[in-house]
Image (cartoon, coloured by chain):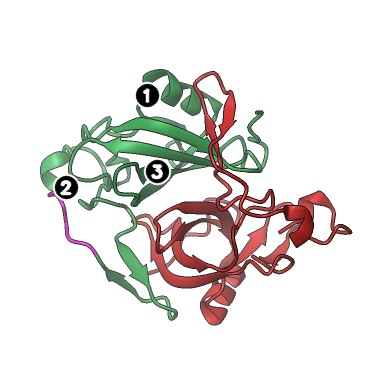
Chain colours: A green, B red
Amino acid sequence: MQLDFTKANGLLPAIIQDAASGDVLMLGFMNDVALAETQRTREVVFFSRSRNRLWKKGESSGHVLKVRDIRVDCDADSLLIRVEPVGPGVCHEGYRSCFFRSMASDGATQVIDERAFDPDKVYDQEIPQETKR
Amino acid sequence: MQLDFTKANGLLPAIIQDAASGDVLMLGFMNDVALAETQRTREVVFFSRSRNRLWKKGESSGHVLKVRDIRVDCDADSLLIRVEPVGPGVCHEGYRSCFFRSMASDGATQVIDERAFDPDKVYDQEIPQETKR
């Protein structure tokens, strides 16, 4: 099956789901090289849009995502990657999932989960906020 | 919380998850109008990149997605929408989920689910393939 990288400037959205709990943990983007690296190493590698380079999830935190299964959708333009997450959480803000806020109809958000770890202890303090991954 | 629509040409990826089973059903994109319509009607409305217009999920099939909860990620650039799906499946190919194919390391894919309905009976035969939604 030929993946369709044309719709988002060479990138595909990749949903990361905890294979054991079914929880959606995060969404990242992959170009063809990131996907090939993910398949080769069996650990998730994204393409960072903000840094314009490959980004191995957990490269600074150690919280890597071990690949259990990769699924592709009907239009071949989105991926669902079921993983075993290593560590207490995937989010650089210290939560198990990056989707830790619920949004009401008026746009107001509410935190619906508890912090799983202290990000200040996991991420090097020299690393700027936007590269805490 | 201000959503960041700047990273993907005014669109945010929106993951659709079955609130009851936890299964990921599909991924679509939303612009600000599609999100506002989704919030107002409590049924999912996407922005179709291929047709360049709003697209209410289920507009031809009747398989609408009733919104249970909307979550936003840490970077405010992705949505997780937990739904109650109406009908046997969301995929225009007749499956419960659009992610019905597993992909091996060599790129070969395998169908891992059974058809939930006959798309020929659900979608008007006059409708071209790319607009079967």
Q: Is residue B126 visible?
A: yes
- Name the residue carrying label 3: A16
**Left or right for A115, reference A45:** left
Q: Is residue A115 magenta?
A: yes
Q: Please state which of residues B26 and A115 is positioned toward the viewer in this rendering.
A: B26
Q: Is residue A125 visible?
A: no
Amino acid at pointer 1: Arg
All told, the count of numbered labels is 3
Where disc 3 sits, the SS reads strand
The crowding category of the residue bearing disc 2, from other C-alpha atoms within 10 Å (few below 14, some 14 to 19, many at least 20), is some
> Pointers 2 and 3 in contact (CB under 8 A)?
no
Query: Gap between marks 3 and 1, in whole Å?
Result: 13 Å
- Name the residue carrying label 2: A119
Give the overall secondary structure of the magenta segment.
loop
Q: Chain of mark 2?
A: A
Same-chain check, marks 2 and 3:
yes
**Left or right for B44, reference B82:** right
- Name the residue carrying label 1: A42
Q: Is residue A27 magenta?
A: no
Find the magenta span and give its range. A113-118
Q: Quadrant of the N terminus of chain A?
A: top right
